[in-house]
Image (cartoon, rainbow, N blue to C red):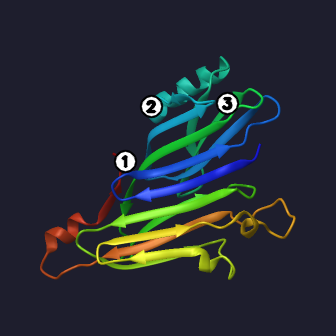
Amino acid sequence: MVPVKQEWSRQRRTGNNVTVQLTPPRKSQEIFFEVDLPKTAFIANFSMEIDGQMYVGDVKEKEKAKKQYEKAVSSGQTAGLVKASGRKMEKFSVSVNIAANSSVTFVLTYEELLQRKLGQYEILTRVKPEQPVQDFQIVTNIYEPQGIAFVETTATFLSNELLPLVKKTVTDTKAHISFSPTLDQQKKCPGCEGTIIEGDFIIKYDVKRKKGLGEVQVRSQQRLFSST
């Protein structure tokens, strides 16, 4: 089953959204949706749209979720669970059985509290599409009313060919960063099925600070990327 769309979008006021749309399979099968999340993040919403029918997940605390997940899986129901995935990340995974020729779209919304470390904030997006995607994009919008001092963007998978595809627009208080490689640009080689898009997409930035505003500086040590 080939993904036709994968989108990671972050906005200062509307939250962090991961959207994956899959092509209809030729036969019924079990499909998996997995996303690596920062340990400081928490899930605000998860939904699936299957053949136009929307299914909204019931987000629970981790301990309660684990018990309900095991119960749901044993009875054949669809369920998702967040598990540890390394020192900085956790993995959200869900599987669902769908009929042949069914269209499915997953949407995950999560909130993240950013900690200022070494004089900057870091927004990390881990991407693992596993194969080239027809419509792939990462979009981040930052709004800081006290002013943006700098914005830097790196990725573990960025080659010299992919680097120009990172678009960045920065004003005094806003920043817009996007990355949208074409299907061919994602491939390891012409005709290959594998993708070079796998790893961490990292944005580092800081806000402008004025001397003598100690209270403001203390309060600005954290940034909450939240959903409406």
Farthest right residue in view: 191
Q: Please report whichever mark, 1 or 2, sits nearer to the chain's N-terminal start.
A: 2
Q: Is residue 213 left or right of residue 79?
A: left
Q: Quadrant of residue 60?
A: top left
Q: Which residue is at a point 47% across and 35% down the rendered structure image? A: 62
Residue 143 horizontal side relative to residue 109, left or right? left
On the image, numbered disc 3 is attached to which residue?
96
Q: Of marks 3 and 1, which one's residue comes earlier in the chain?
A: 3
Which residue type does callout 3 highlight? Val
Q: Residue type at mark 2? A: Lys
Residue 157 location (% of width, % of height):
67, 71
Element at badge 1?
loop
Nearer to the camera, 127 or 176: 176
Residue 57, image x, y percentages? 50, 30
Name the residue carrying label 2: 60
Measure the alpha-carbon separation of dots 3 and 1.
26 Å
Numbered tag placed on residue 197 in the rendering:
none
Using the image, determine if residue 170 lies above or below residue 72. Answer: below
Residue mark closest to the camera, 1 vs 2:
1
Q: How dense is the environment of label 1, judged by Cα within 10 Å: few (below 14), some, or many (20 and up)? A: some
Rendered location of residue 225, percent (x, y): 37, 55
In which quadrant is the N terminus drawn?
top right
Residue 71 figure quarter: top right
